[in-house]
Image (cartoon, rainbow, N blue to C red):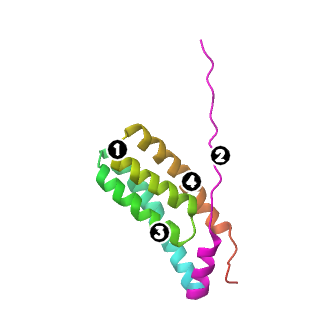
Amino acid sequence: MGKFAILQHDEQVRLNPDNLESLYADLGHAGAEAIVCRAMEELALRLADLARLHDAGHLARLARVARSMVAISEQVGLASFARVSGDVALCAQTGDPVALAATLRRLERIGDRSLTAIWDLKDPGG
């Protein structure tokens, strides 16, 4: 019997602090915090929606939700999250079930880390 390799997925999350700095500069502390909190809530909800849509086979809706996540994550500087959300949308549009499943799992991993990492950044406006 052959040996199995266990792959460790330890991808670094890329953040763009310039986007956050712009939010804080434009909206002040309270306004920027409100935008960041709302964005994180929306991304978490939409991430859960993706799994549900995938299970139900609604690929067109899944692609639309993933595309909407690109804009939200870019607004608050979640570069990796935005890139992989775009990859998920593309895979859903092409109808490749293996690629879609893989990119969805990758987005879940990056999403969890990204939503946590955004809080680790210090208030760029303060």
Which residue type carries mark 2? Answer: Asp
Compute the Cα span from label 1 to label 3.
Answer: 24 Å
Q: Earlier in the sequence, mark 3 or mark 2?
A: 2
Q: Residue tagged by mark 4?
A: 110
Compared to residue 77, the image places residue 27 above or below, namely: below
Q: Magenta segment range?
A: 1-28
Q: Which mark is residue 10?
A: 2
Compute the Cα span from label 1 to label 4.
Answer: 20 Å
Disc 1 and disc 2 in contact, CB within 8 angstroms: no
Name the residue at 51% across, 51% down. Answer: 108
Q: Picture quarter containing residue 29?
A: bottom right
**Secondary structure category for the residue under label 2:** loop
Which x, y percent locates residue 102?
A: 48, 41
Are there few (<14), some (14-19), or many (20+) residues within 10 Å of tag 1? few
Q: Residue tagged by mark 1?
A: 55
Q: Earlier in the sequence, mark 1 or mark 2?
A: 2
Compute the Cα span from label 1 to label 2.
Answer: 25 Å
Q: Earlier in the sequence, mark 1 or mark 3?
A: 1
Which residue type carries mark 4? Answer: Ile
Which x, y percent locates residue 46?
A: 41, 60
- Numbered disc in front, either 1 or 4: 4
